[in-house]
C-alpha cells in the first residue's frame, strides 16, 4: 500500500509529517509513503532521523505551498505545483492509494473535487469523522466541506457515512440519524424535514432525528447534518472541552493543597484525557470522491498525523469509495424498481 | 415588582417552582410572585413549606397544562387556560412585570408572540442566554426560537442581544459577532454573509465572524446565529461537558487508589463544577416581545429556577424591552438619514 502525504500542510508542516511518516513506516512493514513537498526541507528534516531513509519512503518535490488562510478557488488556480495538489495528483494517477493532508480544508476539498471528481450519484464531498462518545463513537458528517446542502445531498451524506461505518467498524447495517433541534417529526427546517422523508423511504437503517447532545451518546452510528451546522457543533464542542480543562488546570494549580491533589490524581486525569484525546480521532475522511483523501487537523502533532495515516490505510484496505458506489447502486436499483 | 411563574411547566412542575419561589421571596423583600397553575396542587406543595404563605405570594388558578412534547400550534389553540398561557396573559394585562416558565419552549415562543406581540421593527422573537467562557461570558442568540432566519432578522437579533447585554452587564457598546464556519470574509452561506453586510453598515460595535469555539472564549459580548445552529451548538456543548464528567467519574471510581485521589481532589473538583455550573446560567430571555418572558431549562432544579427569577427581576429593573425599542429607533433614524 502506498500513501502520499502533503508534507507541507498544517501548522507545523514537515516537523509533524516527517516524524509521523517515520513512525508509521516502522509500525507497518508493508507501507510505502511518498512525502510531497519541498525536497530540500524534507531531506533536512529527514536527516535528523538518522538511518530511517528506506526504500519505502520516497520524496516527491512540489515547489509550492497552499497557505492555511488562502482562498480555495485561488489556490486551485495558482498553486498547481503545491504539495497539497501534487499529493492528490498522485492518487489520481494511481501512484498512491490515498493521500493525507493537514492543509487548508477549503483548498483540499476544492482541489480533490477538481482532480479526482465525484463518484457518480454523489453531488458534493462531505467531511466525516468519528467523534468520541460515552459508549463507543459516532461518525458525523458533514463537518464543513459545504455551507449548505439540499435534502438529496443529505441523503447522499447518510449513504456515505453508512458505507464508511460499515467498512471501518465492521457493522452490517449502521443506524443513521439526522441532527435536528428536536426529535419530534414537526421539528426543524424544510431541508432537514425533506431529508427525513427521503431517508424514511431509503433502504438505510434510518432511526429519525437526534439532538446536539446525542452526538456524544454513541447511540447512533452515523449522524448527518449540513456542513455549516456540523462545523459549528464540532468547534463549539472543542471549545467547551478546552474551557473545562482550563478551569480544571486553574483549580488544581490554585493552592499547595490543590497541587497535591493534582499530583495524587495525575494517573486518573491522564486516563480521562486519553479517553477523549482528540489525537486518536484525528483523520477525517473526505467522502464522495473517486479516491481516498484524509484530512488531518491543521494543528495536529506527529501522533495525531500518524493516526490520520492509519485511517487512510484502513480506508484503502476496506475500499471505502467502492463501498459507497455499492450502496449507491442499491439506492439506484430501488428507485428504478419503484 | 411582580413576577408570574408558570408553576406547572418543566420536568418537575410545582416541586421545583414552589421552593424556588419561596427562596426568591425570602431573598427579595420587595418581590411579589404569582404562582400560576392548579390551585390544589400548588396549595399542597406550599403546605410543605410551613408558614411561608405571605401577602407577597399569590396563587392564580389555571386548569390546563401544556405537555413538554405538545405541538406549539395545538397548545396555542386548545390550551387557553394553561399555566403557561395564563402567566403570559398576566404580563399582557399588566398584572405582572414579567413571567418565567420552564415549560415547552415552542409553545412558550408561540404563545408569547401571539399574546404579547412583537416590538415594532422586530419580526421574530429570539432566545438569548449568557454562556460561560474562559473569561467572563458571552450572550448568544438565537438558541432555538426559530429554525431559520433572514439576514435582516439576524441583524435584529444582534440589536436585541446588544440591548440586553448593555442593560444587564452595564456595557456601553457591547461587541457583536456572527457565528460562522471561519473568520475570513468569504466564509459561510448567503444568510450569514448578508447579515455581515447589514451589521457592517449598522451603528453596532460589529467585530466580524467568530467560530464555534469562540463561544467559550468570552472575547465577544454578543454572538449571533440562527436558532437551528444555536440550539445544536448549545446542546452539543452540553453533551460534550456531560461526557467529560462521566469519563472523570468513571476514572475516579475505578480503583481504591483513584477513589482516594477523588477524595483528596473533592474541593478542587467542586470548584471546577461551580465555575461552569449550568444552574447559574439558567434563565434565557425571550427577546423581541412587548414584555419580559424568561425561559428556564426544562430540567431545572429549584436553585436553577430561582436564577431564572433573578434574570426576570434584572430585566424588569433594566427595562430590557424599552432598551431594545431604543436601539431600534437609532437604526430607523440612521436609515431615514441615509
Image (cartoon, coloured by chain):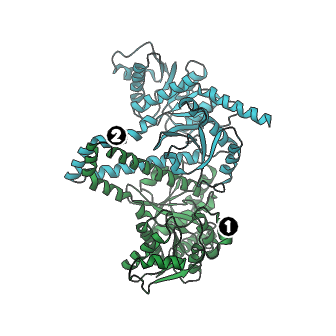
Chain colours: A green, B cyan
Q: Nearer the viewer, residue B142 or A31?
A: A31
Q: CB of mark 1 within 8 Å of CB of mark 2?
A: no
Residue B140 is situated, as x and y percent measured from the top left of the image, at 55, 41
Mark 2 nearby-residue class (10 Å; few <14, some 14–19, many ≥20) = some
Q: Nearer the viewer, residue A175 or B17?
A: B17
Task: Give a yes or no on whether discs 1 and 2 share a subunit.
Answer: no
Q: Residue at x 40, y 77 (%)?
A: A49
Q: Residue at x 67, y 41 (%)?
A: B155
For the question of whether residue B301 can be seen, the reply is: yes
User: Which quarter of the picture shows residue A221?
Assistant: bottom left
> Which residue reaches farthest left?
B256
Number of numbered discs overlaid on the protein picture = 2
Q: Residue at x 51, y 82 (%)?
A: A59
Quarter holding the C terminus of chain B is top right
Q: Please indicate whether residue A217 sits to the left or right of residue A62 in the image.
A: left
> Circle 1 sits in a helix, a strand or a loop, which is it?
helix
Give the residue pinned by disc 1. A74
Q: Name the chain under label 1.
A: A
Residue A252 is situated, as x and y percent measured from the top left of the image, at 32, 46
Mark 1 nearby-residue class (10 Å; few <14, some 14–19, many ≥20) = few
Q: Residue at x 43, y 51 (%)?
A: A242
Residue A122 is situated, as x and y percent measured from the top left of the image, at 61, 69
Residue B271: mark: 2
Q: Nearer the viewer, residue A229 or A51?
A: A51
Establish if A266 lies above or below A106: above
Q: Name the chain under label 2.
A: B
> Which residue reaches farthest bottom?
A55
For the question of whether residue A156 can be seen, the reply is: no
Q: Please indicate whether residue B246 sits to the left or right of residue B253 in the image.
A: right
Establish if A220 lies above or below B141: below
Amino acid at each position: 500500500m502506498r500513501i502520499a502525504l502533503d508534507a507541507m500542510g498544517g501548522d507545523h508542516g514537515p516537523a509533524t509529517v516527517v516524524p509521523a511518516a517515520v513512525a508509521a513506516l516502522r509500525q507497518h512493514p508493508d507501507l510505502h509513503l511518498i512525502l510531497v513537498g519541498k525536497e530540500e526541507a524534507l531531506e533536512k528534516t529527514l536527516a535528523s532521523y538518522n538511518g530511517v531513509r528506506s526504500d519505502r519512503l520516497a520524496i516527491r518535490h512540489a515547489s509550492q505551498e497552499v497557505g492555511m488562510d488562502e482562498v480555495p478557488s485561488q489556490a486551485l488556480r495558482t498553486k498547481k505545483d503545491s504539495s497539497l495538489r501534487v499529493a492528490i495528483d498522485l492518487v489520481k494517477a494511481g501512484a498512491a492509494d490515498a493521500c493525507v493532508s493537514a492543509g487548508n480544508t477549503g483548498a483540499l476539498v476544492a482541489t480533490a473535487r477538481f482532480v479526482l471528481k465525484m463518484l457518480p450519484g454523489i453531488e458534493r464531498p462531505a467531511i466525516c469523522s468519528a467523534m468520541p462518545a460515552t459508549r463507543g463513537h459516532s461518525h458525523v458528517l458533514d463537518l464543513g466541506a459545504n455551507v449548505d446542502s439540499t435534502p438529496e445531498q443529505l441523503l447522499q451524506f447518510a449513504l456515505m457515512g453508512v458505507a464508511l461505518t460499515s467498512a471501518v467498524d465492521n457493522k452490517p447495517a449502521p443506524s443513521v440519524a439526522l441532527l435536528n433541534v428536536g426529535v419530534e417529526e414537526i421539528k426543524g427546517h424544510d431541508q432537514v424535514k425533506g431529508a427525513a422523508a427521503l431517508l424514511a423511504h431509503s433502504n438505510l437503517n434510518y432511526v429519525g432525528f437526534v439532538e446536539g447532545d446525542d452526538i456524544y451518546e454513541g447511540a447512533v452510528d452515523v449522524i448527518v447534518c449540513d456542513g455549516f451546522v456540523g462545523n459549528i457543533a464540532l468547534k463549539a464542542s472543542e471549545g467547551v472541552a478546552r474551557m473545562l480543562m482550563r478551569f480544571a488546570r486553574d483549580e488544581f494549580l490554585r493552592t499547595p493543597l490543590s497541587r497535591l491533589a493534582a499530583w495524587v490524581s495525575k494517573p486518573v486525569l491522564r486516563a480521562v484525557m486519553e479517553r477523549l484525546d482528540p489525537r486518536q480521532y484525528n483523520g477525517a475522511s473526505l467522502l464522495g470522491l473517486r479516491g481516498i483523501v484524509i484530512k488531518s487537523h491543521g494543528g495536529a502533532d506527529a501522533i495525531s498525523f500518524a493516526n490520520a495515516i492509519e485511517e487512510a490505510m484502513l480506508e484503502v484496505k476496506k475500499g471505502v469509495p467502492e463501498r459507497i458506489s455499492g450502496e449507491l447502486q442499491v439506492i439506484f436499483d430501488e428507485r428504478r424498481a419503484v
